Amino acid sequence: MKRVISDLALGVRLAVGGSRKSWTRLALQGFGIGLCVAMLLLAASLPTALDARADRVRALGTVARGDGPPPLLAEDHSHAFRSDSIRGFYLKVLSPDAPVPPGVDRLPGDGEVFLSPALADLLASPAGELLRPRFPERVVGTIGQPGLENPRELRFYAGDASIEAEPNGNTVYRWGATGRSGAMDPVLWLLSLVGVVVLLFPVLVFIGVATRLAAAQRDRRLAALRLVGAGAGRVRLIASGESLIGALAGLVVGFGLFFAVRPFVDRISIAELSSFPSDVTPTPALTLTVVVAVPVLAVVTSLVAMRRTIIEPLGVVREQNPVRRRVWWRLVPVVAGAGLLVSQIGHSGERTQLDTTAFVAGVVLLMLGIPVLLPWLVERVVFRMRGHTPALQLAVRRLQLDSGTAARVVGGVAVVLAGTVTLQMLLAGIEKEVRADEREEVSHQFLTISGDSTTDLSGLPALMGNTRGVLSLHRLDQTSAEVDDRTYISVNMGSCEALRSLVTVPDCADGKAYVVARAGSRESVRAGQVLKVGVTGPDTGTPWTVPPVEPATGTRPGLFLTPAAAAGLRSQHSDYQAELDPSIPDVAEHTRNALASHGHRVHTYYVGQDNTSEVEHVFGVIRRALLAGSLLTLLLAGASLLVVGLEQVRERRRPLAVMTASGVPRGTLARSLLWQNAVPLVISTAVSVATGVGLGVLVMRVFDTEVAFDWAGIGLVAGLAVALTFAVTVLTLPSLWKATGALGLRTE
């Protein structure tokens, strides 16, 4: 054991000693592995962050039943402000020992309000000027972390002595509902599941790539050790020590980057992506896994890389006739991954029906197929290439001698590009579906106004008539009906102007009836069908025969009846549709402020304002994060290519100097370096784009999402890879000029 430790220590000394190049190599390895470790630690923090958020959400729930008289009344309410939703509770204290909600030290009195930090900042800023009339209460404090789902949440607790006990259960005996919190939104669940797989898998690939940097220099050092008497086994152990110190340096850098970035996670402007720094804590089990797996992976990768290397005292040689790479076993991960994903198509109607293990395994196998298949593909391409120019001939011959090194270096970036392309397709398809409904509704410039059962809206027409920007006001009565198959459909009754605020009705006239079919069906009801209208419970409702109906288009399925067609039907609820003038800036907010006198018992809904929704914000942030991550990985891969290129120039300095002395122009040698870098990158880019598109199509089919291609994003990522080739070549030129000088002919 003492000898093993001494050999490992010698490998460490060789890795950090000797020259500035050794430190540069170690710094590059440490930075590359450190970035991967930081990303793994962030991923290891997801369970803690999600659990902490879920616990706070459960703590915000109310328990409406208990012993004795209720100590507290609470009415939850959501204020709409542009594209934001401001949630909170209006509270009335009935007992001195009334339960206090999380995040505040006492209950607000009548006319008092507690605000979240984000809401307080919004109200204090010029952007929140239109929101202040809806919060006339006196601010008495700030809601702390236990009462917030995330740092960017807009939340409040306000006191209101006018609240009365209602039969629907607005009593509160304690805070903190039991049971599980609400399920994650399917869109975010899909993006999270695929994103974690396609972004973390390349991290593991790149750790292996980073440990192979400067392999030629390492081989020369190992040959020198053989010359002084070290055995082959000891040499490999020393080489493992060199890889180990790079991995340990990467762990130190990774933890440093993680703790440097963690304090800023609460500054993310999108609520769904923001989190408290204390929540971003890796679980002990996953942290231990990262700490152990990274050095082990580095050492194993180093040993595997040396399996065909014969280290002799006078140099390093590799098998003169390398084994021809076989393709059959390299296709197994691709075929198996595609088969697993195809087997899940049509199983995503309910999330519980999808075999998550098979789905994740399919994605991982397809991603694994890229670095496994790429060396064979690069070998086949370069062995079939012919140099039509001296520069291309030099590059092709060099790649034919050693194509595996270039394929391994670009393998990591190929996996990242494939994952980025897949996520870009998912974002494009989901965003297309989300925005389709929004665009269909956004053409209606109507604000829906509704109140609860205790709110008197009789003065609403006069109030809206004096509000600037309100063109007209229409009443829309609503009830529900039970269809024969025990499904329910909404029944909307109003004038033609009121109906047009919701759907497109052709040739509307009093006495007509219209139907908007549910998605996937041609019609919801038919003329002459008997429905039960006004259903409030089992065995309730009045039989009603559907009159002749005409089809209509809209985003809300149901029946739409003019007054004559609705004769005899009783309304269960009434809404008002206020037609607004879209030419007036923030017309919806001015109208809501006019309704502020009714308090929180009036609700509004408006989709006509041209504001970017929260979903679109999330998509934008994710897209920018993907591009930033791809750019960072490309830069790191470029650094790897640069090190390999500089090593190859150093190894070939005498042949290069001889060719220059024989009359070969330096420009020809420079172009050969460009081809030498470009060929593997072009092949890997083509493979990654094809794999990413195929994986994206399969994943979108599994989740029954419309297939869409973000060619602009795909082209941008591919263009970055092409630009990287030129950048690496330009940075290699100074070393080439030095190697091809007269001093390059000197020998000892």
Image (cartoon, rainbow, N blue to C red):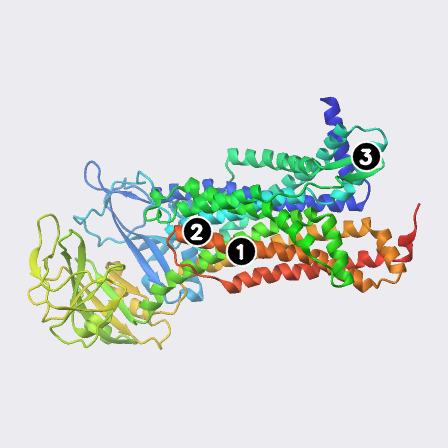
Is any part of residue 591 visible from this angle?
A: yes
Task: Give the quadrant of residue 627.
Answer: bottom right
Kind of residue sitting beneath label 2: Val
Element at label 2: helix
Numbered label attached to residue 277: none
Above or below for 65 versus 714: above
Q: Which residue is mark 1?
A: 690
Left-right relation of 69 to 107: left
Q: Nearer the viewer, residue 612 or 729?
A: 729
Looking at the picture, how far across and down is residue 137, in whole percent?
Answer: 32, 58
Kind of residue sitting beneath label 1: Ala
Of mark 3 and mark 1, the one earlier in the sequence is 3
Q: Residue at x 36, y 65 (%)?
A: 436
Looking at the picture, how far across and down is residue 496, in whole percent?
Answer: 18, 74
Element at label 1: helix
What separation in Å lies between label 1 and label 2 (alpha carbons)? 14 Å
Kind of residue sitting beneath label 3: Glu
Q: Residue at x 36, y 71 (%)?
A: 586
Above or below for 536 versus 127: above
Circle 2 crowding by C-alpha within 10 Å: few under 14, some 14–19, many from 20 = many
Left-right relation of 329 to 357: right
What separation in Å lies between label 2 and label 3 (alpha carbons)? 50 Å
Numbered label attached to residue 312: 3
Left-right relation of 548 to 717: left
Is any part of residue 277 visible from this angle?
A: no
Marks 2 and 3 in Cβ contact (< 8 Å): no
What separation in Å lies between label 3 and label 1 (alpha carbons)? 42 Å
Of mark 2 and mark 3, the one earlier in the sequence is 3
Q: Nearer the viewer, residue 117 or 373?
A: 373
Front disc: 1 or 2: 1
Q: Residue furthest top?
A: 1
Q: Which residue is mark 2?
A: 699
